[in-house]
Image (tube, helix red, strand yellow):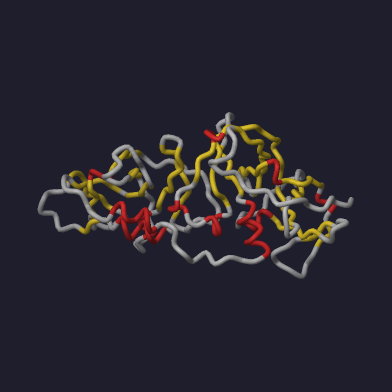
């Protein structure tokens, strides 16, 4: 089958777009993703693709009147494992350079309001690394990651330096520790204690499974919803180079200047209580944690 050559490039969704947007929902490696429907030129069966073995970035190509369209494997792009499925499809994306994306399944289209879209904070990392820009809360309760089409195309055709930090401005929110009581916590299985200002604490709970976010910093276990806003769940011990541990508690944290706001969730193994004024335990360096995330 011959694909139609992709047309003019379309911009990704943004907060300035109209109140509703049509999306196509797909699955890659067991994770739900979404793309603007307007970014898709056509959808083909995998049999339309000729396999290519000379370039690890591409699994094949689709002949078209405008030239061969290279196809990337979505599982490889997002670092996901293999999945047994007979429903794989090729998405031919609009724009240049011509680009195809192999996905595991298509779960239909949907019309959403812009209020269903939540944009990822800089703490998750730059879009050039994540290749996603936001998440969608669907009416069926599922969470989909919105693929950033321009970032995906740059990643596949050009390659982008993702070493720059995007979290510096967020880190400044924790520059000055507020006065007042401090929690005394443990981050691993040792007897070493750490201090955390209670003014930063928004919520304490048992462990909760986060939604997966491929390509994020290895210390980000995934994302949690805080009043519908996605925040990263941090493996605190791993980020601080402490021995591996199984956390029993998570603490949702936000800056003292924003009492209703939360930015991230830390994992801890124990909360021993409110620290005495004379405790010499080390204070958790939230500025350093935030800077290492981005």
Q: Position of residue 166 (x, y in %)?
A: 44, 58
Q: Position of residue 80 (x, y in %)?
A: 61, 54
71 or 96, nearer to the observer: 96
Query: Of all residues shown, which one is farthest toward the left?
Result: 278
> Do we see residue 206 in this rendering?
yes
Give the residue drawn at x 23%, y 56%: 283
Q: Is residue 122 left or right of residue 117?
A: left
Q: Position of residue 141 (x, y in %)?
A: 55, 32
For residue 185, above or below residue 24: below
Tally of numbered discs? 0
For residue 38, above or below residue 63: above
Q: Quadrant of residue 215?
A: bottom right
Q: Is residue 234 left or right of residue 259?
A: right
Give the residue drawn at x 58%, y 65%: 160
Q: Quadrant of the C terminus?
A: bottom left
182 or 148, nearer to the observer: 148
Give the residue drawn at x 29%, y 53%: 174
For residue 190, above or below residue 37: below
189 or 275, nearer to the observer: 275
> Do we see residue 249 in this rendering?
no
Q: Position of residue 6 (x, y in %)?
A: 78, 52
1 or 81, nearer to the observer: 1
Give the residue drawn at x 34%, y 38%: 205
Query: Of all residues shown, which one is farthest toward the bottom?
Result: 54
Query: Of all residues shown, which one is farthest toward the top?
Result: 139
């Amino acid at each position: 089958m011959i694909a139609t050559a992709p047309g003019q490039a379309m911009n990704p969704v943004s907060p300035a777009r109209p109140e509703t947007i049509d999306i196509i929902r797909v699955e890659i490696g067991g994770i739900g993703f979404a793309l603007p429907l307007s970014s898709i030129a056509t959808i083909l069966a995998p049999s339309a693709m000729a396999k290519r073995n000379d370039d690890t970035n591409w699994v094949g190509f689709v002949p078209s009147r405008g030239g061969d369209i290279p196809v990337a494997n979505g599982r490889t792009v997002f670092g996901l494992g293999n999945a047994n499925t007979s429903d794989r499809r090729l998405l031919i994306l609009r724009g240049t350079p011509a680009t195809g994306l192999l996905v595991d399944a298509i779960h239909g289209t949907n019309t959403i309001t812009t209020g269903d879209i939540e944009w990822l904070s800089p703490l998750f990392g730059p879009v050039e690394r994540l290749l996603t820009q936001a998440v969608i809360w669907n009416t069926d309760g599922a969470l989909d990651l919105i693929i950033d089409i321009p970032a995906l195309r740059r990643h596949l055709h050009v390659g982008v330096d993702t070493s720059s930090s995007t979290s510096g401005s967020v880190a400044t929110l924790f520059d000055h520790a507020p006065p007042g009581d401090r929690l005394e916590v443990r981050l691993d299985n040792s007897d070493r204690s750490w201090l955390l200002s209670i003014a930063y604490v928004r919520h304490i709970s048992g462990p909760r499974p986060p939604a997966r976010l491929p390509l994020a910093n290895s210390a980000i276990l995934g994302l949690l919803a805080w009043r519908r806003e996605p925040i990263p769940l941090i493996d605190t011990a791993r980020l601080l180079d402490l021995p591996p541990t199984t956390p029993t508690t998570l603490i949702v944290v936000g800056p003292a200047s924003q009492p209703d706001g939360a930015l991230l969730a830390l994992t801890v193994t124990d909360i021993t209580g409110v620290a005495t004024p004379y405790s010499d335990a080390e204070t958790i360096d939230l500025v350093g944690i935030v800077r290492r995330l981005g």
